Amino acid sequence: MRILNLLKIAYKAIILNKMRTLLTMLGIIIGVASVIAMLAIGEGSKKSIRSTISSMGSNMITISPGADMRGGVIQDASAMETLTLNDYKTIKEQANLLTYSTPMVNGGGQVINGSNNWPSSIYGVNPEYLYIKLVGLQSGSMFTEAEVKSAAKVALLGQTVVDNIFAEGEEPVGKTIRFNNIPFKIIGILEKKGENTFGQDQDDVVIAPYTTVQKRILAINHINQIVASAVSEEQAPNAVTQVTEILRSQHKLSDNEDDDFNVRSMEELISTFSSTSEMLTVLLVAIAGISLLIGGIGIMNIMYVSVKERTKEIGLRMAIGGKGSDILMQFLIEAILISVTGGLLGVILGLSVTLFIEKFLNWPTDVALYSIVISFAVCAITGIFFGWYPARKASALNPITALRYE
Amino acid sequence: MTKEIIKIQDLKRKFTMGSETVHALKGISYSITKGEFVTIMGSSGSGKSTMLNILGCLDQPTSGTYEIDGVNIKDLSKNELATVRNEKIGFIFQSYNLLARTTAIENVELPLLYNSKVTTEERKKRAIKALKMVGLGERLYHTPAQLSGGQQQRVAIARSLVNNPVIILADEATGNLDTKTSYEIMALFQELNQQGITIAFVTHEPDIATFSNRTIILKDGEIIQDYKNHNIQSATEHLAALPIENNLS
């Protein structure tokens, strides 16, 4: 018997019992839809965390002075003076796994423009800072190496600072502002970055050459941090190791001494956050998987009823020449047709729900192709698995007794 | 000599139920030749259902031989039996056994669905032809619920004809019908028989037997009578002779 004929027979049987079939499918539909929606939410949040972290530079490496003890008192890291420009220069020369690097000094203060003022932070860096932090410029330009060397009093502003000390429509580039009473000429405006994952406003900054900040504002010789970018995200962990080794020899630390600095990559941060959301995803999928299983049992149940109900029909089909295998295939195909159609409807529902969540609840979602493929495959397997036993039962019927069945 | 369609020799069938053995058929021999219209009669427990099941290749004899159209079914597997049923036998049942909510033409096509040698167009053509033979050429797309009992049985007869079987096996085919409709159906059987179709009709109603040209009577698993009917009644005449129904007021 041709498979096409069997498909036709199974299709007819399903059409004849629309309501019942639909109710049977419901379990599968809800199961598949929830697997897809749950995974989309899980993937979406993972992706959103990753993208906020990447927007800060996913291959970024931060080197900061480590906690040190002075007379038994653990000092605040910012008070440490263990990181120097020499350290920076050595790293720049020796660390070949880094693309860009900049020393960083930072301090707080008041930004003043005429009668307006605003509390903000100033970051002293070199021009490579923009490439590390992946910040673009809205207008103007970055300061040059020459300006760093001459400790020029030039600065770039973040959008928040601009909004607070300039009137709307006023062009800040070219104007002179004061930071802690030191005049700075504004040469550029940073691109708006918004809040980061941790709720910090990334636009509330003033950027100036580190030499200027060191000498004119903070009056220090050490640096607070070295920020660098690894050649690639994958190389970031190796770069961390490399920098650590360079700094240890630079600081002449013996093997039994702890690091007096900290080297951290963004990757560590990402994995911390990802693991939380991954666990959530696994949990959600497990729940969805259970509902898929229940859907499968629903199919088995209905197929049993169907076989019982159609005993006479099975007897007739056998009497007019249907082989056991024909009957088996008929019911198996019916079960698969129900589960696959249910799966298809489930995919559609799942995608709609995902779209709804994204549009109206504003949750980040990301439909993974694999979730569709997997849940669909699980559906087909469910159909075969739970359809097999009832179909076997049907095919094993004795035509004589089946024909007599009332 | 005309061709022997059915050849049964010393056929026995016993069932074992627990410790008891029931001898349903105790060594039966007979043949049915092409073109015969045989009624197989007997009271319940006579073994006629067992006989019919074996004739229909739904069951196999315990011993003895049964040949249908030259094929000995003794050693056939389940699947081979199914093929024999599909290609050589037409079944008609007391309760029609039509698929509900399925049109007449689809019901008639059913046996051909299990024969992969028949194409879709061929299948449809043959189904229409069979339905025309039973006088339902105008009701191809009616479902059983839209047809009367007699019409439903006609659909079932068309279904039994569609595979061009060597024999039609009817099991109490008029059992669910009133007298008038029974005669109509019997008239149809006679007409088909005149066209050369071999029919074996199992019944317990003696008047049905008068329409056939041979009667085999079973009792306790043995043939007690096997005679040619020399005075075949015409169902059409009986139908005409029926009193015209008055309004039952």
Image (cartoon, grey):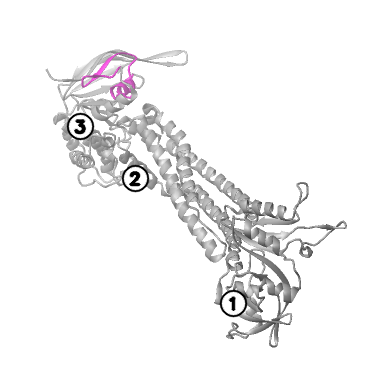
Q: Residues within 10 Å of mark 1 (few under 14, many from 20)?
A: many
Q: Which mark is residue B164?
A: 3
Q: Chain of mark 1?
A: A
Q: Which mark is residue A189?
A: 1
Amino acid tagged 1: Ile
Residue B130 in the magenta stretch? The answer is no
Q: Marks 1 and 2: CB-CB under 8 Å?
A: no
Horizontal side, residue A345 vs residue A279: left or right = left
Amino acid tagged 3: Asn
The answer to which of B25 and B2 lies nearer the viewer is B2
Horizontal side, residue A164 vs residue B5: left or right = right
Image quadrant assignment for residue B191:
top left
Q: Marks 3 and 2: CB-CB under 8 Å?
A: no
Up-down: is B204 above or below A312? above
Up-down: is B133 above or below A37? above
Residue B142 x %, y %: 27, 47
